[in-house]
Structure formats: structure tokens, C-alpha cells
Amino acid sequence: MNFFSAVSVEQAEASAHLPKGDMWSVHKFGGTCMGTSQRIQNVADIILRDPSERKLVVVSAMSKVTDMMYNLVNKAQSRDDSYITALDEVFEKHMAAAKDLLGGEDLARFLSQLHADVSNLKAMLRAICIG
């Protein structure tokens, strides 16, 4: 007997624990909507103006960042050390947007996490490059 035949619909619904009857508002914003700090602020304003009690928000990477990430991996796979400069560009793009949108402790926390994430990504790319 496989897993799907062993679990009834009622059992699956019982274990889902999703609120029933409440209205949800779902927002999806593509990369162009997330392309600049001003556009990110516009997205935030839309979400904040939404009176729905429950919200699901899905955002894409900032405009062109997905392409930048593919480029990083391709350069690392080709043993092209310019992936380091390209990674710096990704970091700068996110840091500039953060500085426009955040301040004080929020900015410090975000930049600390961004630095950690970029450091981890740099280590992974280095492993790809030498692998």
C-alpha cells in the first residue's frame, strides 16, 4: 500500500491546521515590482493599506538579480574569478536598497544578515570554482 492510499482526505484535512472561514488576501509581486527601493516601498505601502487580517505575500528577487545569480554560478563553474566582482554587485544592489528603506537597528540587522548570506554564497561559489 502506498502513502497516498493510506491517508484519507479527512485525515489530511485534520492535520492541515489552516484557519477556516477567514478571508485571506494573496499578493504576488514580480521582479520588476521589486526592482528599486522606491518600488519596494510601493509594494510595502500596498500591503500595509490592505485591510485584510490575513495576508500571504510572495515576492520575487529584485529585478535582474536572478540573472545575476545564474551569472555568478556560470562564472564559478568556468573558473572565472570575476564571479567575486559580480557577487559584490549583487551585494551593493541589496545594500543600496536597504539603506534607502531602513534605518537604525533594522538597517544594522539587515546588513548583518546580508553580509552573512553573501559570505556563505561566496564560500559556495569558491567551492564550485575549485571543484
Image (cartoon, rainbow, N blue to C red):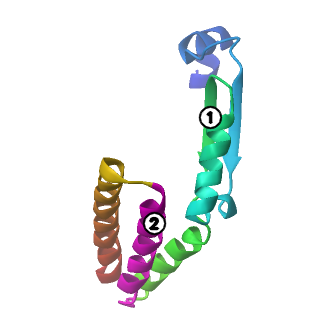
Q: As rendered, which of 109 and 4 lies closer to the eye?
A: 109
Q: Position of residue 3 (x, y in %)?
A: 56, 24
- Judge the density around disc 2: few (<14), some (14-19), many (≥20) Cα neighbours within 10 Å: some
Q: Is residue 128 visible?
A: yes
- The span picked out in magenta is 79-101
Element type at marker 2?
helix
Name the mark nearer the viewer: 2 or 1: 2
Number of numbered markers: 2
Q: Position of residue 70 (x, y in %)?
A: 53, 74
Quarter occupied by the C terminus: bottom left
Is residue 98 a member of the stretch shown in magenta?
Answer: yes
Amino acid, disc 2: His
In the displayed structure image, the side of residue 80 where residue 51 appears, left or right: right
Q: Residue at x 60, y 46 (%)?
A: 44
Amino acid, disc 1: Leu
Residue beneath disc 1: 56
Q: As rendered, which of 77 and 93 lies closer to the eye?
A: 93
